[in-house]
Image (cartoon, grey):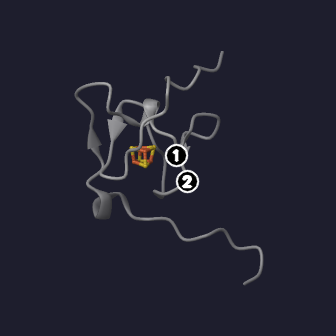
Amino acid sequence: MSGAPAARLEKTAVNYRPARKERRCGTCVSFRPEDMACELVAGEIHPAMVCDRWVPLKRSHPVRA
Ligand code: SF4
């Protein structure tokens, strides 16, 4: 299985949920806004959500036009 991407965590395993404050995917180092994805968690990821693996960026990801 060479070339297969690393397995990502299931959303349920990391308590993926709606974010209430600035602690959200849109301010997390693992978020990939160009893909609506996360380096750690599988599936489509939304910037207004958050999970237990959140690590803060110094600033929000830029929003793509
Ligand atoms: S908060 Fe969790 S799901 Fe969201 S980008 Fe960060 S690690 Fe990924």
Q: Which three-letter amino acid code belongs to the residue tagged 2?
A: Glu
Q: Relative to 19, say whether 39 is above or below.
A: below
Q: Which mark is residue 50?
A: none
Of 40 and 17, the residue lying toward us: 40
Which quarter of the figure has residue 12?
bottom left
Badge 2 density bin: few <14, some 14–19, many ≥20, Cα 10 Å: few
* Residue 62 image point, x, y percent: 59, 21
- The residue indicated by pointer 2 is 39
Left or right side of 2 for 28? left
Position in image of residue 37 (x %, y %): 54, 45
Mark 2 and mark 1: Cα distance apart in space: 5 Å
Q: Quadrant of the N terminus?
A: bottom right
Q: Residue furthest bottom?
A: 1
Circles 2 and 1, Cβ within 8 Å, touching? The answer is yes
Q: Is residue 37 left or right of residue 24?
A: right
Look at 43% across and 65% down and name the residue there.
Answer: 9
Image quarter for residue 54?
top left
Q: Is residue 54 above or below residue 27?
A: below
